[in-house]
Image (spheres, rainbow, N blue to C red):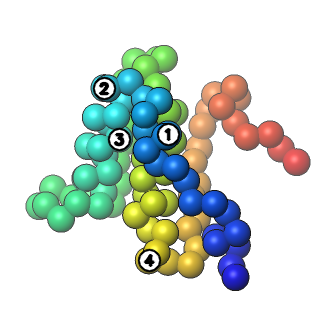
Amino acid sequence: MDDARNTPRPDVDRLLSSLKPFQRRSVDYVFDRLYGSGADTTTRFLLADEVGLGKTLVAKGLVARAIDRLWNETGRIDIVYICSNPRHRAPEY
């Protein structure tokens, strides 16, 4: 069993239910642009807005949806998230 399968699958519905409606719409829009099948799909996306509107929460929701989509397609899922706000950083071990 590889490392990805030792980690429990994220509960996407629970995570997304904690978002405000505009944050959820942002997650859905970005996800559709990255993983959709339309003519406007892209491999990159920049999310920008005013300070304090929840970009970190939107990113968390997007990562959860991406993991959920890729879960059965690949054995390993690597995610790099750069956050300049030290309050949102994971503790260093």
Judging by the rendered image, the residue that carries numbered circle 3 is 27
Tell me which numbered mark, 2 or 1, is placed earlier along the sequence: 1
Q: CA distance from mark 4 to mark 3?
A: 21 Å
What distance separates the C-alpha of mark 4 from that of mark 1? 22 Å
Up-down: is 28 above or below 9?
above
Q: Residues within 10 Å of mark 2 (few under 14, many from 20)?
A: few
Q: Residue type at mark 4?
A: Glu
Residue holding disc 1? 15
Q: Amino acid at mark 3?
A: Val
Q: Earlier in the sequence, mark 2 or mark 3?
A: 2
Single out the mark in the foreground, 1 or 3: 1
Q: Which residue is mark 2?
A: 22
Q: Which residue type does callout 2 highlight?
A: Phe
Q: Secondary structure at mark 1?
A: helix
Residue found at x 64% / y 72%: 5
Q: Which mark is residue 73?
A: 4
